[in-house]
Image: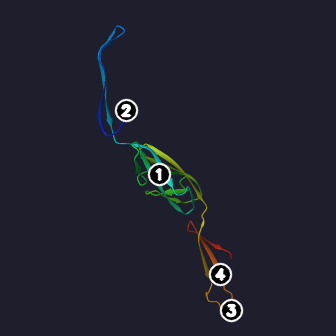
Amino acid sequence: MVTAKNKGTAIITVSYGGSTLKNLTLSQVSTQITITVTDAVVDHLTANISSSKLAKGTNAQLSVNAIMTDGNVKDITSSANYAVNPVDVLHISANGMVVADNKGNAEVTISYGKQSAILPIQVTAATLDSLNLTASGSTAIPVGVSSQLSLTGTMSDGSTQSIVL
């Protein structure tokens, strides 16, 4: 077995000197092979995201690393290729930002060189992000007078919903 340590070329020669074994005379023989050690290549990919479950309208940063044959780790988030199936559930920007578009389950196939990895992501219904309470008139109300209040919720997908008080 030969293990590559550094880039370069090595010539390995194996020789066996002449001898006599059980009345058999063996002449000297040898052989050689030239081994060229090249730069490390991608062994496999790893992909990480803060959560594999996103609410519609939210986003999360994806991080992709190439683990090289020499053990080094290379961040390839911006240079990897991304394919999403089905395409209407989410999309990914060139820098790895995952944006949840519609409720459903998707698989993200990440490829770089000859290697690939699959990352499942679930997009759930939009969630309540904030509340806004308003008065129909002035917020200074005299004793004995009523004022109508309205409560509106803003969802993670940017939509708003009136909430009955």
Vertical placement of 66 versus 99: above or below?
above
3 vs 4, front mark: 3
Does dot 2 land on a helix, a strand or a loop? loop
Horizontal and vertical percent position of residue 39: 34, 42
Q: Choose the circle earlier in sequence order: 2 or 3.
A: 2
Residue type, mark 1 in image? Tyr
Discs 1, 2 touching: Cβ within 8 Å? no
Q: Choose the circle earlier in sequence order: 1 or 3.
A: 1
* Residue that mark 4 sits on: 149
Residue type, mark 2 in image? Val
Q: Residues within 10 Å of mark 1 (few under 14, many from 20)?
A: some
Mark 2 and mark 4: span between their CA atoms? 78 Å
1 vs 3, front mark: 3
Discs 1, 3 touching: Cβ within 8 Å? no
- Residue at horizontal 64%, vertical 89%? 141
* Residue that mark 2 sits on: 2
Horizontal and vertical percent position of residue 7: 31, 40
Q: Choose the circle earlier in sequence order: 4 or 1.
A: 1
Residue type, mark 3 in image? Val
Camera-side residue: 113 or 61?
61
Vertical placement of 20 versus 80: above or below?
above
Looking at the rendered structure, which numbered label has been put on residue 143?
3
Q: Quadrant of residue 35?
A: top left
1 vs 2, front mark: 2
Horizontal and vertical percent position of residue 15: 30, 22
Q: Quadrant of the C terminus?
A: bottom right
